[in-house]
Image: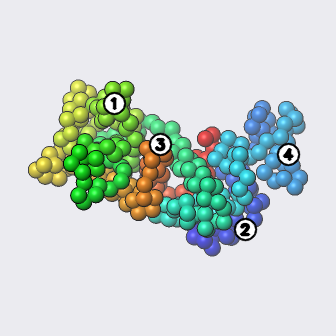
Amino acid sequence: MNYLQFQKLFSAEEAIIAHYISIRYKEGIKCNHCNSDKVYQVKDRPKFFYCSHCINHFSVFKDTIFEHSSTDMRKWFYAIHLFLNGKKGISGCQLQREIDVTYKTAWRMLQQIRKAMGNKEVQQSFEAIVEIDETYVGGKPKKNFNKDNKNKRGRGTKKSPVVGVIDRQNKQVHAKVALPNKEGKKLTGKQLLSILNEVVKQSSIVMTDEFKSYNILSKTEHIHLKVDHTKEYVNGLIHTNNIESFWATLKRGIYGIYHSVSTKYLQNYVNEFCFRYNNRDVESMFDLLLLQSINI
């Protein structure tokens, strides 16, 4: 959706509310308290409805990312439009300038939108051939880094590890920040297997590199194929190029647009880029995000 289409579709707040109602209440508006369909729109307050059954008022934006926000809904929808149209996202400072709000408000709006992007039930849907790999997100190492390797690249770094799984056929990706376990260890075999099993069905072909933690796959029903990156990056059909391509997109977005991300909010940014990647061919991405904004 381009700017002209956006302006035509959402020319007024009433149009925005009507559009959201059509997304959320496809089978007709029902009370959020008692689920009754005996509801009436409140005059002069279009986002509020009155239920004659339980005698309660409710907002169509209750239990969504828009709840408890005093920001104009036109600004919210325009923020989503800008965010989705930016291939690598949009910074809080830029959004602040675009919709004329404080930086604190712009930052919160972006975090809420990212929550909606990750608001999807994870289920085992990957099968056939999948690739799993890990990457590390944090500040770029200095050219002359210290002897204690504080900014070391790759395994052994102090950066935050992210594990990703990609379905080679459907080109769908699932990624999670892998925080250290109770013993302080990162990327153990059990941790990697747990993330893999969230989306991958049993008896799948799993492509990995030579990282020793992946050896746990030999104890499962999966067929484990490895490529030795010290010798080659592709061995026929055995490679992890697809997930590594996703890592490149993720890092270009974080370093280029956001510059730095704390571990506390890193999963939200990972969810953002997974959403963008998985729905890159979906024409109604805007409406999909609105649908996922419910029950945050």
Earlier in the chain: of badge 4 and badge 1, it is 4
Side of 44 relative to 158 (left or right): right
Q: CA distance from mark 3 to mark 2?
A: 37 Å
Task: Where is residue 38? Give x, y as percent.
Answer: 84, 39
Mark 4 is on which residue type? Tyr
Tag 3–tag 2 contact (CB < 8 Å): no
Q: CA distance from mark 4 to mark 1?
A: 55 Å
Quarter assignment of residue 260: bottom left
Task: Where is residue 174? Give x, y as percent.
Answer: 40, 44
Mark 1 is on which residue type? Gly
Camera-side residue: 194 or 206? 194
Mark 3 neighbour density, 10 Å: few (under 14) some (14–19) many (20 or more): few
Can residue 117 be seen here? yes
Mark 1 neighbour density, 10 Å: few (under 14) some (14–19) many (20 or more): few
Q: Quick one: SS at disc 3? A: helix
Camera-side residue: 163 or 21? 163
Q: Which residue is mark 4?
A: 40
Q: Which residue is mark 2?
A: 11
Task: Where is residue 192? Give x, y as percent.
Answer: 31, 34
Earlier in the chain: of badge 1 and badge 3, it is 1
Q: Which residue is mark 1?
A: 184
Earlier in the chain: of badge 1 and badge 2, it is 2
Residue drawn at the location 74% of the way across and 56% of the way down: 18
Side of 239 relative to 282 (left or right): left
Q: CA distance from mark 1 to mark 3?
A: 17 Å
Q: CA distance from mark 4 to mark 3?
A: 42 Å
Tag 1–tag 2 contact (CB < 8 Å): no
Q: CA distance from mark 1 to mark 2?
A: 53 Å
Residue drawn at the location 34% of the way across and 45% of the way down: 159
- Mark 1 or mark 2, which is nearer to you? 1
Residue 264's tag is: 3
